[in-house]
Amino acid sequence: MITTGSKFLIGSAVLAAVAAILYGVTQDGVMGTVGLATAAVALTLLAVVNTMTRDSNVFTDDGVPLETVAAAQPSPLGGIWPFAFAASGVIIAVGLVTQQTIVVIGLAALAATGAEWIISNWADRASADRRHNASVRSRLSNPLEFPLGGAVAIGVVIFAFSRVMLWFSKVNTVIAFSILALVVLGIAFVFANRPSIKPGAIGGTAVAGAVAVVVAGTAAGLDGERDIAVFETTSLWQQEAIAHPEEYAEGAEEGKHPAGFICESAEEFPEADEKASQTVAMKSNHFQIFLLEDGTLDFDVPGPRDEGSDVITFQRSNTTNIVFRNESDEDRRLSLDMGTEDFESEDGTTRIVPVQQCTTLIEPGAAQLLTVTPPLPSNVFADSPNPNAPSGEGGFWFFVPGVSSATLELVVP
Amino acid sequence: MAIIERPASESAGAVEVYDPSVATPSSSYGFLRRPVESTGWRSWAFTVDHKKIGIMYGVVAMVFFIVGGIEAGLIRLQLAQPEGTVLSADYYNQMFTMHATTMVFLFVMPMAAAFANYMIPLQIGARDVAFPRLNALSLWVFVFGGIFLNTSWFLGGGADGGWFMYAPNSDVPFSPSNGVDFWALGLQITGIASLVGAVNLITTCLNMRAPGMSLMRMPIFTWMAMVVQFLLLFAMPVITVALFMLIFQRNYDATFFSVAEGADPLLWQHLFWIFGHPEVYIIVLPSFGIVSEVLPVFSKKPLFGYPFVVFSGAAIGFVGWGVWAHHMFASGLGPVSVAVFSVATMAIAVPTGVKIINWTLTMWGGKLQFTTAMLFAIGLIVQFTIGGLSGVTHSVAPSDTQQTDTYYIVAHFHYVIFGGGVLGLFAGMYYWWPKIFGKCLHEGWGKQNFWWMIVGMNLTFGPMHIIGLQGQPRRMYQWTEFRAGEGFFNLGFWNMVATIGTFVLAIGVVFWMIAVWVTHRPGSKVPPAPLDPWDARSLEWMTTSPPKPHNFDRTPTVHALDEVFHRKYEDVTGEDLPEFPDPARAEAHHNYVKVATLEEIVAEEERLGDEHVHLPAPSYWPIVLAFSLPVIAYGVIYTSWLIAVGAAIAVLAIFGWALEPADAEESDFEPPSEGESSKELAHV
Amino acid sequence: MTFVPKWTRPAAIVGVAALAAGCATDAPQDTTQPAGPNAQMIYDLSWPIFLIAGIVGVIVMVAIAYAIWKFRDRGQPIPEQTHGNPKLEITLTIIPALILIGVAIPTVATVMALDETDDTECIVNVTGQQWWWEMDYPVQDGCGGVSAPIVTSGQMVIPTETPVLIRGTSRDVIHSFWIPRLNGKRDMVPGRTHNLRMEADEPGIYAGQCAEFCGLSHANMRMEVVAMEPDDFEAWKATQLSEYESPAEGTLAATGEQTFITNCSRCHVIDGLTDSDGEPVISRADQQVYAGVAPNLSWFMTRNTFAGATWDLLNATCRDDVWDADPADFGERYLEGVSEECLNQVDLREWLRNSPEKKPMYADPEQLEPTDGLFRGMPYLALSEAQIDELVAYLLERK
C-alpha cells in the first residue's frame, strides 16, 4: 500500500521532525527549529499527497493492467495550471512591493493552482482511458473545488456588494437597495413567464450581474466608505468628564464639545446627541415622564394615580424603564440626579462627584428611554442638599437642564 | 477513502444480486477499503441499511427510555412524602430537567424515527431510503448527541433549568455548572440528526414510492411520519437559533438574554415554544399513524375516513404553528395576544377530535381481535382523549392561569405524551415485532405489560389532576405538610398514590423486557412467526420476515390502499353464493374470500424477482463524521483546541465521504462463489 | 374473551376531580375556592368547561366501550370494507367546532375583563428575587394614603374589598406571582412591569407560591396575601411608618442592635437605624447579593413568616390561632405580631446559625466566580450562640 516514494517522504518527514525537536532542545534560537519544523510539516504534506496518488503511478500495486496499458500512455493534455501557477508567483511579487494582503492572496492562489496542477498531471497519466482520467480527476478535485470555489465566489460578491452599500450615503443605500431588489424581481418575473428561455441566458444574466457587482464594488472600495460616526452615549460623556477633568476641559476649550457634565447641560453634545435614535421601542407598562409646555414635569405610572401625588417611587436595585416625552417646544433632555459618590482618581485622590444619568437631547414631540437602577435609597441623601432640587432639598431629583421649574422628586425606599 | 478505482472493466457477468454485506471486494484502492463485514459489530456500525439503522434507533431509544424512567422514579420517590430527602434541591432540578429532555429528545423522537426508518421504505415498496449514508449519519449523530448530553452527569451535573430552559435562569450566574452547556450543545447535535433525517425521509416519501402508490394510497403511518418530518424541518431551525443564542450567551459573552443590557427574556420563550409546540405533534403524530395502522388490521376494516385522518394530520401540522403562545398565558403578553392564542388553541382541538372519532368508527362494525398491539391502540384512544379534554380546559386562558405550572399541566401532557405517544409506540412494537425479528412477542407477557402499564399510568398521572387543582406547582423539590390540606383531596395521599403508580408503571415496563427475553432467549419455545401473523393490510408484510436486505425481490405495483388485503381477499358478491337466493339482498352483501395467503404471494414475488439489484454499500464516514460533533462540543465547553481537533475530523470525514461513491462499483465485488445463488446468501 | 373496560376508572377520577371541585377541601392553595372577584371570574368560566369536557369524555368512553363489547370477534364474517362516511364525519367535525365556539366567546370576554385594572385603588409593587418576594407600597394617595414608602417581604398586607393593583417585576430571573384563591398567576419578568388586579372579599391569609421555576430554591419561594379590614390596614400602615426606637440601654436587645449593625446591616435595611456616632446605617446589598437587595427588616416581627415565607415566625399553636381566626378578629390577631412566647425559636435560630444549610442557596464564598463575588441568598455568618441570642432579642422588638 505504501509506495517507495511515500516511504522516502515519510522517512524524511520523521527525520525533520526529530531534528527539529533535537535542535529545539539543544540549541538556542528559534529560527532553526522553525525551519526544521516547517520542513517536517511540508514533507508530511507531500508524503500524504504522494501516498494518495501512489507515486503518481496507478500501476504500482495493480499488476493486471500494467502490460496492456503501459504502451498506450496518452500524451499529457494541455492545461492552464502552469500559467496560473506562474501568475500566482507574479501576484506575490507585486504584493511584496505593495501590500501584504496581496501577498496572502498570491500565496493562496499559488497553493490552489499548485494543487490543481499536481492533480491534473497525475490524472493525465492515470490510465490509457481519457474519459476515466477525467473522472478520477474530478472525483478527487471536485469535492475541494466546488465548496472552496463557491465560498470564494460568494465571498467576493458579498464583499463587493458591501463596499457599494457603504459607499452610498445612509439614505441612498435604501434607495439603491430597493432599486436593485426591483431589478432582481423584474428579471425573475421575466424568466418565470418564459419557461422556454435558454438556460444559458439565465446563467449569462447571473454572471453579468455578478461581474457588475464586483466592478462596482471595486470602484466603490477604491473610493472609500462614507463617513461613519461612532455613537457615544450620554453616560460615556458623563464618565469622561468625571474621570479625566483636565482633558475634558481641554476638549471643551478646543470647541470639540460643550463644557460641563452632559446631564447638566442644555446644549447639544455632538457625538451623543446628534446620532441618537429618537424613537423608543415599546416596553410593557413603562413609567412615563412628560416635560409639559409650561416647563414642569408630569409623570404617569402604570395603574391609577391621584393628581395630588407629587413624588415618584422606584424600587431599589431594580431596573426601571422610563420613557421621557418632550412636549415643550425646545430640544430637551431628562436628567436624574441620584446624590453623590466618592470617585477615586488614577492618582489615588478621592473626589466627591455627582451620580447622574440622562437621556439624549430630543426634539419637541419625541420620546427617549432612560433606564435606571438606583443602588441606594434616596433617604441617604435626605440631609445633603441637591443642587438640582428646588431650594436645595435633599434626595433624588429628576430635572431638565435649562428649565429650572422642571423638577420631580424620586423616592427610593 | 477509495480514491483510485480501477478503470471500469467489462461487466462482471450475470450476477443477480450485489449485496455488499455478503460479497467480498476483490480489490479496492486508496487508504481504506469499504467495510464489507456481514456479521459482527462492524456490520452494524458501518451499515447503511435502513432496517439495521431502524433497529439501532429503537435499541438506543429504549436504553434512554430506561434512563429517563429511572429519573422519573427518583422524582416521584422524592415527592412521595412531604419534605422529601431522597434528592437534594440541586439534584432534583437536574433530574426533572434531564427526565423531560431524555424522554422527549432521546426516547420518543428516536423511537418514532426507528419506526419511520424501518417502515417507510417497506410501506412504500422501496429498497432503502433516498440517502442511505445520511440515514446512518442521522443515527450516529443522535447516538453521540445523546451520550454527550448524559456525560454531563459525570462532569459537574446535568442541566438544571428545566427542559424549557427559560432565560435568564439559564445564564451562567444562575446556572454555574456546565449542565446547561451540555444541554444546549447536546440538543444542537441531536437537532442535526433530526434535520438530516427529515430531509432524507421527505425525499424518500415523495420520490421513492412504488409504481401505483399515489399519495392518497400511501399507508397512514407513512403519511403521519411524513407530516412529522415536515414539522421537524421547520421546527428544528428555530430551536437551533435559540440554542446558538444560549451557547453564545454562556460561552462567548453575548447579551441576547441579559436584562441589564436591555434584553427581553420573553425572546427565549417565543423561540422555544415556536419550536416546542410543534414538537408536541412531532411526538404524537407517529403514534397516531401507528394506531391508524393497528386498528384497521385488528378490526378487519379499512381505516374509517382515511382522507379525513390524513388531512386532519396535515391540519394539525399547520395549525400547530399558530398556538405556541398558549404556553405563555401567564407570561404577560397582553390580553389581545392571549385571546387570539386561546381561540387558536381551541381550534386545534377539532382536527384532533376528528382522529379520535375516526378511530372509534374504525372499530365500529368491525371484527375486533384484542391482541396486545390492539390493546395498546385502544389504550391510546382512551388515554389521549382524557389528555385532549384536559387540554381543552386550559386552552381557556383564564382557567390556564390557575393551572399552568401546576401538576394539572403535568397530568395533562403525560396523558398526551405517554397516553398519546408512548402507548402508540408500544402498539407499534407488538404489531411489527414479527416483521422485524421474525417472531411474535410473547402475547401473555405482553398483556401483563399492557395492563400494568395502563393501570400504572393512570395511578401516576390521574392524581396529578387533583394535586394540580389543589395548587401544587411543578418543579418544586419539596412540598410541605402545612400546605397539603386535609380531606379527600389532600396532597399527601394523592402524591403517595402517584408515586405508587410510578412503580406499577415501571413493573409494566419490566414485563415488556420479560416478554422480549421469553421470546428471544436461547432455547425459547416461541415459534417463528408466520409471514402474516395478524392478517395485515399494508405493503411491508409483502416480503419475508425479517425482510431481506433488498426488501422486495420485485418492486411491487400498487393498485389500492391496503394493497396486501386486496391481494389476499376477493370480494365475492352475494349472487355467487348459494345462501343468497334473493339477488337484491345478495348484491348488497359483500363476502370476502381469501384467495391467497401471504406465503403464496411472497413465493410468487420471489419467483419473479428482479435480476439485478444493486444496494448501497456500507461506509465508515457517517459514524466518523458523527463522532466529530461531540468532540467539537466538548471543545466549546472546555478548551478551544478540541474544537480544532473535532473540526479536523469533520473535514476529513466530509472529504472521505465525498470521495467515496455512494454505490460500490460492481468491480469491487466478486460474484458469490460457484453453486450458491445470491438469493440464498441474501437470506443469511 | 372477557373484557373489562378499566379506563372507566381514570375517567372517573378526572370526572370526580372536575365535578367535585367545588366540594370542600382545606389545601390553602386550592384553585377551586375563589375568595376574590378575579379568582371568582376565572372559576365561573372554568367549571362549566370542566363539565363539558367531562360529558364529552364520558360520551366518547361509552362509545368506545360499546364498540369493544359489541364488535368483538365472535366469528362473524369479515365486515364490509367501507372507507368512511363523509356526511357523518363532517357532522362529527362540526359538533365539536360548535362547542368550542361556545367556549371561545366567554373565554375572550373573561380575558378582557381580567385585564381591567383601572378601578384599582391601591398600588403595591411586587418584586421577585431568588428566593423571596419583596412588596413595597410607593408614595400614593391610594391605599388610604401612603406618605412614605413601606417595604416589606413575604407577606403582602391589603385592605379587604379594595381592588389592589400589583405592579410586578423581578430583579434576577423570571418568577411568577400566584395567590390561587385571589387570581391566576402572572410571571414577573426582569426588565418588564406586569400588572395584576387583586381583591379579597374576606379578611384572612391567602397562601401562594412562586410558580415559575426560578432556580435552586424555587420550592422555598412562597408568599402570602394578608387581607384585613380597612381600619386594621390603617393600623398596620401606622406601625410600618412609625419612627425607629433603639432598644433600652443595657438590655440584651441593645447588644443585639450592635450585633445587627456588625453582621447584618451590610445587606438588611432597618429604617432609621443609626450607629454609635449617630450616623445612619446604610446597607449596600448591591455589593453583596446578586439581586441587589435583601429583605427590609424594619418591622420584621409584624410579619409571621421569614426566609421567603418558607418558615413561620409563629410557633404552631399561635400560627393556627391566626390562620383560623374568625374573620372579625383576624386583623387584630395578625396585628399583635410575634411575641416572645409565640416565636418559632427553633427555625429562626437554625436559620441564623447556618442559613444555606436550611435553605439551598448559592452562598458558598468559594463558588461565586460566575456572579463576580455576589451571593445569591444569605451566606453562612458564623454567628456564635450568644450573638444569636442577642439578635433574636433585638429582632423581637421589631414590631
Image (tube, coloured by chain):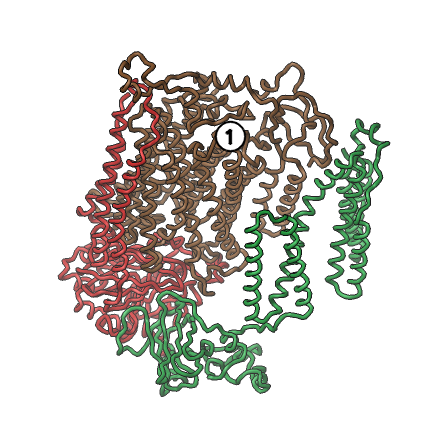
Residue A96 can be seen in this image:
yes
Picture quarter with the C terminus of chain B:
top right
| Residue appearing at x 53%, y 60% in the figure | B253
Q: Locate residue A30: give its quadrant.
A: bottom right
Residue extending farthest top: B578
Taking C183 as reference, is B260 above or below it?
below
Q: Which residue is mark 1?
A: B210
Q: Which chain is brown?
A: B
Judged left or right of residue B640, residue B403 is: left
Q: Locate residue A256: give its quadrant.
A: bottom right
Determine the chain carrying the residue at label 1.
B
- Tell me the colour chain C is drawn in: red
* Residue B349 image point, x, y percent: 32, 44
Q: Nearer the viewer, residue C292 or B280?
A: B280
Taking A152 as reference, is C150 above or below it?
below
* Residue A324 image point, x, y percent: 40, 75
Residue C357 can be seen in this image:
no
| Residue appearing at x 30%, y 79% in the figure | A310
- Tell me the colour chain A is drawn in: green
* Residue B676 image point, x, y percent: 63, 16
Q: How many marks?
A: 1
